[in-house]
Image (spheres, rainbow, N blue to C red):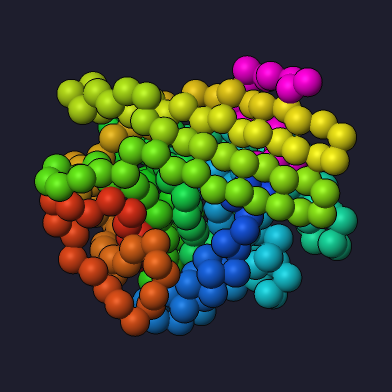
Amino acid sequence: MTEVIEGSLYDFPKYYDLLFGFDWKAECDFLEECFAAYAKCSVKKLFEPACGTGRLLIKLAQRGYDVAGNDLNPHAVEYCNKRLKRFGYPEAAVVEDMSDFTPRKKFHAAFNMINSFRHLETEKSATQHFQCTADGLTKGGLYILGVHLIPTDGPRMETESWVARRGNLQVNSRMWCKELDLKGRNEKLGMHLDIYTPTSHKQIQDEMNYRTYTHQQMRTLLKRVPELEVAAIHDFSYEIETQIEIDETSEDIVYVLRKR
């Protein structure tokens, strides 16, 4: 019999970590390539706003970086800190709003790789987020931001499914657009997770709201924080050799921003 749970994926860090942790190596490799190619300082200290379970923080700590992060969800922060501690690193994640924080120490690079930035509901909170991040960066440091834009021309991706496995645990995920309000700048996503073990099956039913951005709206937003310049633009293929030009059909974009 299937147990159905209506709740937030973020309250189940074990499943979240499995579901979004599969591509960590490509992301970490790309981040390090960005540090080498675009930073105008030596990158040693990293910060991740909306760090979640710390799926990337732990891998980057193991590569020799000094890492820290924040997240609003206490379950995710606890999971992140326990893992850091288990591997001998400081418990460096805190429960904090990514649009209202004062860094405890300057960092050389920050990153937000999989759309978490779009949880910020207003232009004001998004601007504040960039300002807080810019304030924490050293001169020449980077903020690497992965974001899904809304194309204004051509087809757009409206559903996505993938499977993740670890040992006897399997998570099947389906995410789809339930409602798109471009005037109100909101995309409502439905998400179902089917979780299987050898003896059980349960389903988490979640719903999330993301602020929408066309490439022009993102350009306007970035101009509000002049301390950050666009050093490069890539996509989710994470190919450092290939920069892209954003147009009306663009969707999955990685902005490499640099502190002036």
Q: Name the residue: 40% across, 55% down.
A: 145
Residue 19: x percent and y percent?
63, 47
Left or right of 59 on screen, residue 46: left
How many numbered marks, from 0 up? 0
Q: For residue 125, what is the image quadrant?
A: top left
Q: Is residue 148 above or below residue 238?
A: above
Q: Position of residue 156 (x, y in %)?
A: 25, 44
Q: Is residue 46 among the parts visible in the rendering?
A: no
Q: Residue 187, image x and y in percent?
A: 33, 29
Query: Taking 98 as reference, is 213 left or right?
Result: left
Q: Which of the two residues, 198 or 160, is positioned nearer the viewer here?
A: 198
**Which is more toward the observer, 218 or 168?**
168
Residue at the image point whose x is 67% and y is 27% from the top: 203
Quarter of the figure with residue 119 = top left
Q: Which residues are magenta?
A: 1-17
Q: Residue furthest front?
A: 1
Residue 75 is a magenta residue: no
On the picture, is 138 further left or further right than 53?
Answer: left
Q: Which quadrant, please, contains the C terminus?
A: bottom left
Residue beneath the point at 65% across and 67% down? 60
Quarter placement of the N terminus: top right
> Residue at image x 49%, y 59%?
110
- Residue 3 colored in magenta in the image: yes
The percent coordinates of residue 140 (x first, y second) are: 38, 71
177 in relation to 150, above or below: above
